[in-house]
Every structure is written in C-alpha cells, then in structure tokens.
Image (cartoon, rainbow, N blue to C red):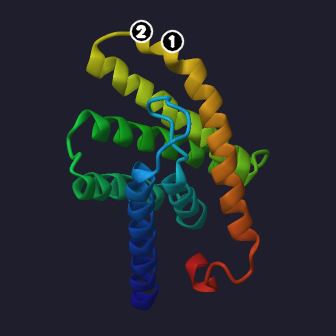
Amino acid sequence: MREQSTRKMVYLSMLIAMGTALHVVEGMIPIPLPIPGVKLGLANMVTLLALYLYGFRDGLTVALLRVFLASLVSGTFLSPGFLLAITGAVGSTAVMALLLKHTRCFSMIGTSMAGALGHNLGQLFAASLLLQSSAVIYYLPILLFSGTATGFFTGYLLNSLLQQKSALPGEWYR
C-alpha cells in the first residue's frame, strides 16, 4: 500500500513538473494573432490527464500547483496575470471534472473544449473583478471562439497520446 501511494505521488509530481514547464514555455511562444489572453492551453492537457487518471482532488492539485510554480518561475506571482491564470485553472478543472465524472457523452476532445471555455469564463470573471467592470463581457465571443479551437487542439493531442499503448506506463492507472 505504501509503495502505491509513493508511486502515485511521484507520478503526480511528474505531471506538476510537466504542467509547469508547458505553462512557462507557452508563455514564451508568440501567438500569431495579436489577441490578448489567447494561448494554446498546453498545460491544460496535463490537468485533464491528471483528472482522467486520478480524479478531481488530484487534478485540482496539479492545476493549482502548476500555476503557482509557473508564476514563481516567470516572476508573475500575485500579479493580475497570476490571478487570471488561477481562476482559469480552477474553472477549467471544475468543468472537466464534472464532465468526466457525470457524463459519458463527451470525448476527451469535447471535455478539453469545455475545459477551455471554463478557463475563459473563469478568467473573464476574475478580470471583471480586477477591473471592477462588466465591460469585459464583450470579449466573450473572441474567447469562446479561440477557446473552442485551442480546446479542440489540446484535446486532440491528449487523445492521441492516450491512444498510444506505450505512451503512459501501466502503473499510472493504479
């Protein structure tokens, strides 16, 4: 029993490290369209993988720690960007966890797309509080469109990874 919990902790630590690295690297990638706040969401794949393998509690832990660590590495801890990232991560994780646990009609791609929309809604909520204005709602159509596209892309990548028999060690599922 102790070996299984240690193994799980090691795998979750690896997921946190991967999510942190993807979060930081993604922040360095210039987006071809000059639309503020639009990113691929590559680190969200790691959160979705953690949710898929281990459930809500561990998925939320991965999401929160990757945002926290990435903000420390990039020097944005407690900045408005950090607050937007943390609320987006919580919104995304909650939406994806609900879909994974309570529905069977969403594929990994659909779950990722819904998670991207949850991320965007969380960010808009935080932005409206930070700016003390509801005018950010006008940004919603742009975020819905971009979130759908990026959620599809990251869901497709994760789905492709999960279809590879050797991509994940069998011990991850225990």
Q: Residue at x 72, y 49 (%)?
A: 109
**Disc 2 residue type (three-letter):** Ala
On the image, the x and y values in percent for residue 104 come to: 76, 49
On the image, the x and y values in percent for residue 81 come to: 31, 37
Looking at the image, residue 70 lies above or below residue 171 = above
* Viewport quadrant of the C terminus: bottom right
Image side of residue 63 versus residue 77, left or right: right
* Residue tagged 1: 138
Q: Classify 10 Å Cα crowding around label 2: few (below 14), some (14-19), many (20 and above).
A: few
* Viewport quadrant of the N terminus: bottom left
**Disc 1 residue type (three-letter):** Tyr
- Helix or strand or loop: what does disc 1 sit on? helix
Residue in the foreground of this view, choosing between 104 and 138:
138
Q: Is residue 161 visible?
A: yes
Q: Residue at x 28, y 13 (%)?
A: 132
Residue in the foreground of this view, choosing between 153 and 83:
153
* Residue tagged 2: 135
Looking at the image, residue 53 lies above or below residue 95 = below
On the image, the x and y values in percent for residue 73 come to: 25, 59
Residue in the foreground of this view, choosing between 100 and 110:
110
On the image, the x and y values in percent for residue 127 come to: 35, 23
Residue in the foreground of this view, choosing between 92 and 29:
29
Looking at the image, residue 103 lies above or below residue 158 = above
- Helix or strand or loop: what does disc 2 sit on? helix
Looking at the image, residue 99 lies above or below residue 159 = above
Residue contact between numbered discs 2 and 1, judged by CB atoms under 8 Å = yes
Q: CA distance from mark 2 to mark 1?
A: 6 Å
